[in-house]
Image (cartoon, rainbow, N blue to C red):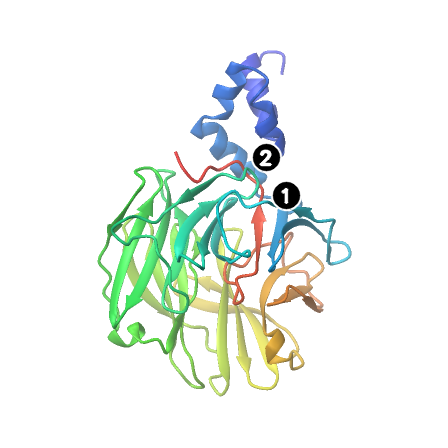
Amino acid sequence: MADLPTHTIVFEILTRLPAKDVGRSKSVCKQWYALLSTQDFVRIHCSRSVVSSNQRVLLIDDLTCSVRPIISNNNDYGPSSIVTFSFHHQNNDVSILSHLNGLLCVCLNHTYELLLWNPTTTAFKRLSTPDSHGFYINNLDAIGLYVDADDDYKVLHIKRRSGVLGVYVYSREVDSWRNIPFITRQEYLSPHFNWSAGTFCGGTLYSTVCECWIGGTNVVICFDVNSEQFKEISFPPVPSNGMVQGVLVNVKNVLHMFASTGMFEMTIDLWTLQGDYWIKVLSCPPIPPISLSLWCDITHYVTNGNWFVMTKLGKLFTIEMDMKPFECFYPVSWFRGFKGAVFVQTIVSPSI
């Protein structure tokens, strides 16, 4: 250590600080401000921030927006801190669509505008443009947030309008949208198909496309973020005699899916993707019926094998498991009620 340059030692220490402490450290001196503002520092700090102890739950209701730590030893949230939106909104009408490395892609429901927002630093960037890019319509559009090989954060926006599908990519680096080709089956343009938000994993953005009735078609659409090519793979082989839903999760850069099926009782299996094929990891007992007014999604799971489901109202239910498959929390990108997100606190900026 004595042989290391002072600059290297300072860099190593500062990249391990919590995100909010990095923000405070920028005011120490001009040299530190310059160092902490470099893309190399942000990238390395982000890579060291993706740990379970640094994850938070963001909850939005009609009156408040709060951030809470997750306490793994008792399956609960810690004390909440109120977050003030740094952008104009109406009655907290903010929908969370996707998240990656501390950035959230959100929609303002009263204007349909898309924003990139870091709730830790409060920085945000509007993605809407005068030529109608960056506007989101619920139940018709799908959003995916990803980073490419050049460390450029991008947003994939799939738009369905009157039987026409358009696919657009926003680049943080150049601050603009562009259209890309997408050849798919015509029936996927129908509103009878539900597109999930994209889950980024291993250089690919994955979305489930599910037909909204019993026995309908269910597939996974894959978008290679560097070649910008699409392909389709099959769903896990789950029973089709009930409602089917797949929730995708990136677990240590391997894609997993919580696949639920059933009617009055839902059975949930966890699958992992190997190549283009799904391998079952584990199953859980059927979940007792939950009132449709409290319909919920898998949101995150913990070291002792418990899974949490979160209702639209933010209430948590726990599904107890006997296995301990993973080592820490992992977020799920799709929230049916758009009222919560599990995110990592970072200093990644929504703009350059």
Q: x%, y% of residue 60? A: 59, 56
Residue at screen point 39% across, 45% down = 126
User: Which quadrant of the figure contains the C terminus?
Assistant: top left
Residues packed near mark 2 inside 10 Å, few (<14), some (14 to 19) or many (20 plus) = many
Q: Residues within 10 Å of mark 1 (few under 14, many from 20)?
A: some
| Image quadrant in which you'd find residue 234 | bottom left
Label 2 or label 1, whichever comes before in sequence order: 2
Could you give the CA–CA distance between mark 2 and mark 1, rounded to whole angstroms? 9 Å
Relative image position of residue 85 (x, y in whole percent): 54, 46
- Give the residue at x 43% y 84%: 213
**Which SS class for mark 1?**
helix
| 190 or 313, nearer to the observer | 313
Residue 19 in the figure: left or right of residue 128? right
Q: Residue furthest front?
A: 90
Q: The residue under label 2 is which amino acid type? A: Ala
Q: Which dot marks residue 54?
A: 1
> Is there a contact, CB below 8 Å, between mark 2 and mark 1?
yes
| Element class at badge 2 | helix
Location of mark 2 (residue): 19
Residue toward you, 274 or 217? 217
Q: Where is residue 197, by image quadrant?
A: bottom left
Q: Is residue 112 left or right of residue 247?
A: left
Q: Amino acid at mark 1?
A: Asn
The one of 297 and 202 positioned closer to us in this rendering: 297
Residue 65 placement (x, y as % from top left):
61, 52
Q: Which is more foreground, mark 2 or mark 1?
A: 2
